[in-house]
Amino acid sequence: MYDGIKGFRDFYPGEMAARRVTIDTIEDAARRYGFREIGTPALERAEMWTDKSGDEIVEELYAFEDQGGRHVTLTPELTPTVARMVVAKQQELSKPIKWFSTRPFWRYEQVQQGRQREFYQTNVDIFGSSEPEADAEILAWAADAMTGLGLTGDHFEFRISHRDILGGVLESYETDVDTTEAIRAVDKSGKISTTEYHDLLVEAGLSYDQAAEFDDLIAGGDLEEVESFAGTERVTAAVENLQNVLAAAEDFGAREYCTISLETARGLDYYTGVVFECFDSTGEVSRSIFGGGRYDDLIESFGGQPTPAVGVAPGHATLSLLCQRAGVWPEEEVTTDYYVLQVGDTRPEAARITCELRERGHVVETDVAGRSFGAQLDYADSVNAETVVIVGEQDLANDEVTVKDMESGDQLQTPVEEFPGDLERPTYDDLA
């Protein structure tokens, strides 16, 4: 007997039914906003990550040398891939470019709540617009996707910040600060103690007094105070941009879900402007549900023309935890519209009824295992069949079939030539 690999999940039909409802809801929201679906490869050149983050990142990848001698990896995230795709056809693509996709990714990391080594995300991105409305549309789509799942503002919140506010405040100190490392420390601040956080800021170049001052300033989240403290054009421009994004989010119906949180930094270095993360309002789901932001320099770093970009990537594992906590996770069960039950030598007529019902778009099963009447009825119940159509030899001798409502147990006979007839979805209630 073979065991599954740690960090890789099996999804049985009931689980997949709930996941499919969730994915369809998210993707339908994206389509309503005009995002177009793309497909992307599972395998990419590992250099797309090592060139940006160093060779040490290989320890977090499923990387190997293929038979052609290329250093490749299973993709750990989508952003570099879509950046490569934009660069490849940049002149041909109409701007703004609005793409989405749902697919698995792979990272070799510690398995914990909401994190597996194979995980699924829906990525939604806009390329080619630096306007605040683009950021706001990403937030609005995310809000629509969440509320479409049955969640409300009591269940989640978007924590919004701006990388240039953090970088600008750090640069305002009259000391040599490694802003990249300091922002990484901010990103970790919610997961470590205050002492550890301040130690990281000191390692990045601040004194302990400055670290405590910076911590208090950022934690306060007062944009006017932050702007006054820094006194730089960079911070002033970032504050104005953040306020413009929030104003657009107000018009787009997403502002009520947004909270200014300057401690939200996002750990990836390619973020350049507004960043945000979605959290469970109660804190019961310990990890962020998802995050995103603006990455205006990435396309150019991949060899393309300067192209502003903003995006978000809801992770399905943490999203399912939130939905379960909120009591809106879809039922994990399969559903069937009809089961066509055969008794005796009735396959031709049973097949006709099955085919006609399927042609109308219904989920229809029929016996393919030569089972008895009772076994077929038990199976129909196990797949939650709403209606059973019994095609028996005696019924056909009377030119009839039996239609049974599985919930009530009521049944009746109806002329075989009139079933399914002109009704789009004939049930016991329609025929009674």
Image: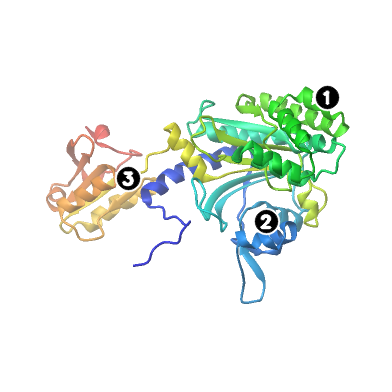
Nearer to us in this view, 401 or 176:
176
Residues marked 3 and 2 touching at CB (< 8 Å): no
Which label sits in the foreground, 1 or 3? 1
Nearer to us in this view, 91 or 303:
303
Residue under the image location 52 percent in, 39 percent down: 286
Which percent across, then down, holds residue 378? Answer: 20, 49
The kind of residue on which mark 1 rests is Ser
Q: Secondary structure at mark 2?
A: helix
Q: In whole angstroms, how far apart are the C-alphas of marks 1 and 3?
A: 63 Å
Q: Secondary structure at mark 3?
A: strand
Q: Earlier in the sequence, mark 1 or mark 3?
A: 1
Image quarter where the C terminus lies is: top left
Residues marked 2 and 1 touching at CB (< 8 Å): no
Identify residue for label 1: 228
Q: Earlier in the sequence, mark 3 or mark 2?
A: 2
Q: Up-down: is 179 above or below 81?
A: above
Which percent across, then down, holds residue 373? Answer: 15, 52
Q: Earlier in the sequence, mark 2 or mark 1?
A: 2
Nearer to us in this view, 341 or 36:
36
Q: In whole angstroms, how far apart are the C-alphas of marks 2 and 1?
A: 40 Å
Image quarter where the N terminus lies is: bottom left
Q: Residue 326 vs residue 309: left or right?
A: left
Residue 176 seen: yes
Q: In whole angstroms, how far apart are the C-alphas of marks 3 and 2?
A: 39 Å
Which label sits in the foreground, 2 or 1? 1
Identify residue for label 3: 336
Instruction: Find residue 81 and name its label.
Output: 2
**Mark 1 surroundings within 10 Å by alpha-carbon count, few (fewer than 14), some (14 through 19), many (20 or more):** few
The kind of residue on which mark 2 rests is Thr
Q: Residue 421 vs residue 88: left or right?
A: left
